[in-house]
Image: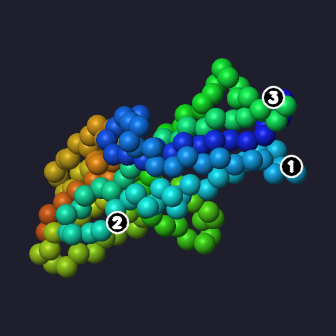
């Protein structure tokens, strides 16, 4: 048995992981294996990006989407499904629009907790700020002496949260879901 081709169904949707419907099917892609290769690669990032709204209206709303990829592999000998016990293979991803640096290579994995990489944040005196976090990886944030518990309902619209930093705050401590210090 050798891999001949693949058919991908790409579902892009908001809500909770796996809650897609037939109307969320955005693309169906078929591709044959190149004879000198042992696998098939399909780049989906730019297709998904078409469905992520990146407008900003000072509202700090998360613009993440769930992406479910259903792939059916076909055998070159029979032309039938490659492994009927595992077919189709379903994979879920949380998609967000971001960027990396050249040194990070293609599609770098972003932080899964605090979305701020510096140890210092400077705000003008008397001005409040926003602190971005990835809800799956943060359990709580303590700003000065005020603790904010972070919850993750699994809904795409709250995966990235922006916590308000009160004016004239001096310390921010970020804790993982197991209470270990992150930042």
Residue at position x 34%, y 62% in the image: 53
The reply to whether discs 2 and 3 touch (Cβ–Cβ < 8 Å) is no
Q: Which residue is mark 2?
A: 54
Q: x%, y% of residue 87?
A: 63, 27
- 10 Å crowding of disc 3: few (<14), some (14-19), many (20+): few
Vertical relation: 41 (above or below) 21: below
The reply to whether discs 3 and 1 touch (Cβ–Cβ < 8 Å) is no
CA gap, disc 2 to disc 1?
39 Å
Q: Nearer the viewer, mark 2 or mark 3?
A: 3
Q: Earlier in the sequence, mark 2 or mark 3?
A: 2
| Depth check, front residue: 146 or 47 | 47
Q: Earlier in the sequence, mark 3 or mark 1?
A: 1
Q: Is residue 179 visible?
A: no
Q: Which residue is mark 3?
A: 78
Q: x%, y% of residue 11?
A: 46, 44
Residue 75 falls in which quadrant of the image?
top right
| Depth check, front residue: 66 or 174 | 66
The reply to whether discs 2 and 1 touch (Cβ–Cβ < 8 Å) is no
Query: Is the image coloured rainbow, by chain, by secondary structure, or in one colour?
Result: rainbow
């Amino acid at each position: 048995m050798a891999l001949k081709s693949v058919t991908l169904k790409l579902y892009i949707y908001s809500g909770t992981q796996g809650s897609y419907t037939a109307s969320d099917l955005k693309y169906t892609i078929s591709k044959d294996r190149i004879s000198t290769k042992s696998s098939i690669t399909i780049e989906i990032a730019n297709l998904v990006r078409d469905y992520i709204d990146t407008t900003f209206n000072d509202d700090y709303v998360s613009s993440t989407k769930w992406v479910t990829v259903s792939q059916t592999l076909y055998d070159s000998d029979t032309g039938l499904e490659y492994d009927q016990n595992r077919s189709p293979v379903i994979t879920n991803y949380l998609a967000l629009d971001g960027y990396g640096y050249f040194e990070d290579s293609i599609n770098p994995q972003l932080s899964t907790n605090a979305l701020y990489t510096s140890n210092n944040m400077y705000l003008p005196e008397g001005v409040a700020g926003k602190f971005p976090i990835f809800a799956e990886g943060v359990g709580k944030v303590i700003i000065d002496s005020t603790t904010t518990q972070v919850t993750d309902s699994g809904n795409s619209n709250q995966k990235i949260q922006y916590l308000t930093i009160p004016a004239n705050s001096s310390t921010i401590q970020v804790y993982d879901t197991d209470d270990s210090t992150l930042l």
